[in-house]
Amino acid sequence: MAKNVIIYCRVSSDEQAQNTSLGYQESRLREYCLRNQYNIVECYKEDYSAKTFKKRPEMQKIMAYCRSYPKNVDEILFLRWDRYSRNLEYALTNIRQLKKLDITVNSIENPLDHNSPDFPTMLGVYIGNAEAENNKISKRTKQGIINSLEKGICTNKAPRGYKNVKIDDTHKYVEIVEDKAKIIRQIFNQVAKGVETPSYVRKQFVRKDFNISESSFFEMLRNHFYIGEVCVPQYDNKPAHYVRGLHEAIIDKETFYKVQDVIDGKKKQQTKIIKENTS
């Protein structure tokens, strides 16, 4: 009796140009099934990066199908073990879940015998190596971001009043959006006076169609980016600190720190004096 299998292809966006593309994987898997006279029940293609199985939409569809029709599936096949998982703990958990349904998983390039006493060891080699490489890539990426931040380069989406400009993959910068920057200057100047509470100032500008939540409003008032600084987070026992950014400041430092005093309650709010009309 022919084995019923589900074929699973997975790739992240940065791998499409390599020999791991979805089309390449599907072609190899279909050839393998044809050669071994396996019956393909379903083909699922995952173009999504996620560490856990629960966060992969197509894998969740596979699990739902297997739970609903366990007798229709004997095995789930994929090209390589790193296409299945790069985390040994998550892989073993998923394998156990499928084992309860009498369903196995396997790679066509490096097939393993689930009944062999060496199965856990060999699984650890294939997925462990992939996980180690993943950790190295993650560390290099994080170090690259830290290096860019130390140079004053904005590595994330620019805050309100700015926009990210991309020349090419290696040349990017941040520039001021003047119409929005003008409103932000007005907000900082008004809060800095200490006459009205920051929350009251926010409501005034919301009425003028500057829509911003209260939490985002206070984050904006605290953001050193507006005085031309970039925050470098704690890394390798080096404490978090600010460096001079490559972008242009919207707010002068004197106004910015007056705003911090108002928020921290160090500057007493002035009482508004309303002159009575005696005429």
Image: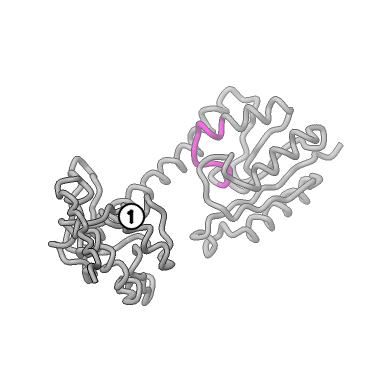
Q: Is residue 147 visible in the rendered structure shown here? A: no
| Secondary structure at numbered mark 1 | helix
Of residues 50 and 95, the one drawn nearer to the viewer in this rendering: 50
Pinpoint residue 124: horizontal percent, then vertical percent: 49, 32
Q: Within the magenta stretch, is there residue 270?
A: no
Which one is in front, 14 or 182?
182
Residue range highlighted in magenta:
83-92
Quarter of image, res 70: top right
The N terminus sits in image quarter? top right
The residue indicated by pointer 1 is 200
Q: Amino acid at mark 1?
A: Tyr
Quarter of image, res 104: top right
**Scheme of colours in the image:** one colour
Residue in the image at 66% along x and 48% along y: 8
- Image height of 38 relative to 181, above or below: above
Nearer to me, 66 or 9: 66
Residue 140 is situated, as x and y percent measured from the top left of the image, at 32, 51
Residue 276, percent across and down?
23, 64
